[in-house]
Amino acid sequence: MTINKQDLDITFFKAGGPGGQHRNKTETAVRIHHRPSGITVTASERRSRQANIEHALERLAQRLEAMRRKPRRRIATKPGKAARERRLTGKRMRSQRKQQRRRVDVD
């Protein structure tokens, strides 16, 4: 999927977390905002600015692809008429079997 560079706002910022002086003083983390869709992605995992840009662009492409895909059509899960009838027939048969186990009352 191709992303038009004019539709992107790319900003750099100092990443937080562990990493010491190098991480605290350099602006290697990147935030990319895709204006047409409103999606914003960030990347600060990599050590270099260019690697973070590439990583963020990959994430953006994945998010745009996920937005483009339509959700799968839901398959009906309600049991059919024949299945309901089979279940009820079985219930009736079990009920009769249990009724026949009862003690016979002799008058």
Image: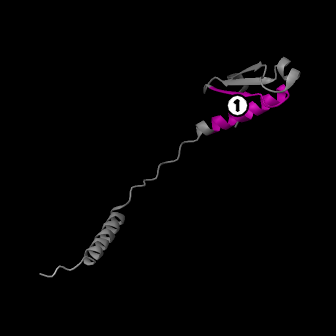
Q: Which residue in the structure is indicated by mark 1?
A: 3
The amino acid pointed to by label 1 is Ile
Q: How is the image coloured?
A: one colour
> Residue at left 26%, top 78%?
100
Q: Is residue 4 magenta?
A: no
Q: Quadrant of residue 90?
A: bottom left
> Residue at left 76%, top 24%?
30
Q: Quadrant of residue 9?
A: top right
Q: Is residue 51 magenta?
A: yes
Quadrant of the frame with the C terminus: bottom left
> Residue at left 84%, top 23%?
23
Q: Is residue 75 left or right of residue 37?
A: left
Q: Nearer the viewer, residue 56 or 4?
A: 56
Q: How many marks?
A: 1
Considering every residue shown, the one lying at the far bottom of the view is: 106
Rendering coords of residue 1 (x, y %): 69, 37
Q: Quadrant of residue 92?
A: bottom left
Q: Main secondary structure of the magenta part?
A: helix
Q: Residues within 10 Å of mark 1 (few under 14, many from 20)?
A: few
Q: Is residue 38 left or right of residue 82?
A: right
Does residue 79 lie above or below 15 as drawn?
below
Q: Which residues are magenta?
A: 39-65
Considering every residue shown, the one lying at the far left of the view is: 107
Regarding mark 1 in the picture, which secondary structure is present there?
loop
Q: Nearer the viewer, residue 76 or 18?
A: 18
